[in-house]
Image (tube, grey):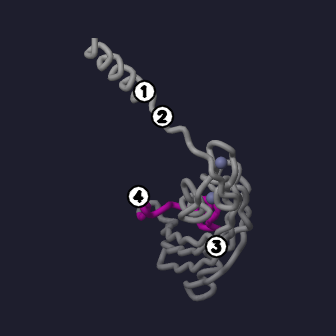
Amino acid sequence: MDVCWQDVRKSGGSLSLSGRLELPQIPVENSDVLDLTEVVVQVTAETTGRQMRIQGTVTAQLTYRCSRCLEPFTEPLSAEFAETVTTDPQQAQDEIWLVDAGCVSLDSWIEQTVNLSVEFCPLCRPDCQGLCPVCGNNRNTHPCDCVEDVADPRLAAFHEWFDDSKNQGER
Ligand SMILES: [Zn+2]
Ligand SMILES: [Zn+2]
């Protein structure tokens, strides 16, 4: 998706536009993301002299794999970005990108905005019960009565030592 200086200037220095972008690499690069719909982008661009302020909103539907129960679930994504660009090398600095006078590609900002919004350790619901470590059932839909073996080997060794010393004391 591009914003062109000429178009913004032609509409009096301020232009709203919308576009769509496919980001197929996001599910490939994020193992928790199963699917991402086409990203819808709404942009407002404003020019002053040789600078342009570009503000955008990105929305899409993300399908995650729950990190506890491994079931897929879909969540809306909505995030914003704002960047300033210039065609004047004198004005370019940390937060102001130097671009050429034709069109400015927004794709890398859109991708970065979506990437930063991808959840780390997504959960299908805050209280997801996850999978049973004994029988493997999804405990949200198939509660089970399995008892988890939580014996700590260090504790077992302590009991052994304690029993031994007690036996020796009785002799
Ligand atoms: Zn879950
Ligand atoms: Zn179980």
Some atom of ligand 1 lies within 8 Å of the CB belonging to the residue at label 3: no
Residue 151 is labelled as 2
Nearest to N terminus: mark 2 or mark 1: 2
Q: Which residue has dot 1 on it?
A: 156
Q: Which residue has dot 3 on it?
A: 59
- 95 in the magenta segment: yes
Circle 1/circle 3 CB separation < 8 Å: no
Q: Which residues are magenta?
A: 91-111
Q: For residue 90, what is the image quadrant?
A: bottom left
Check the image and name the residue furthest to the left: 169
Q: Amino acid at mark 3?
A: Thr
Circle 2/circle 1 CB separation < 8 Å: yes
Residue at 64% over, 42% down: 134
Nearest to N terminus: mark 4 or mark 2: 4
What quarter of the picture does the C terminus occupy?
A: top left
Residue at 60% over, 77% down: 43
Q: For residue 169, what is the image quadrant?
A: top left
Circle 1/circle 4 CB separation < 8 Å: no
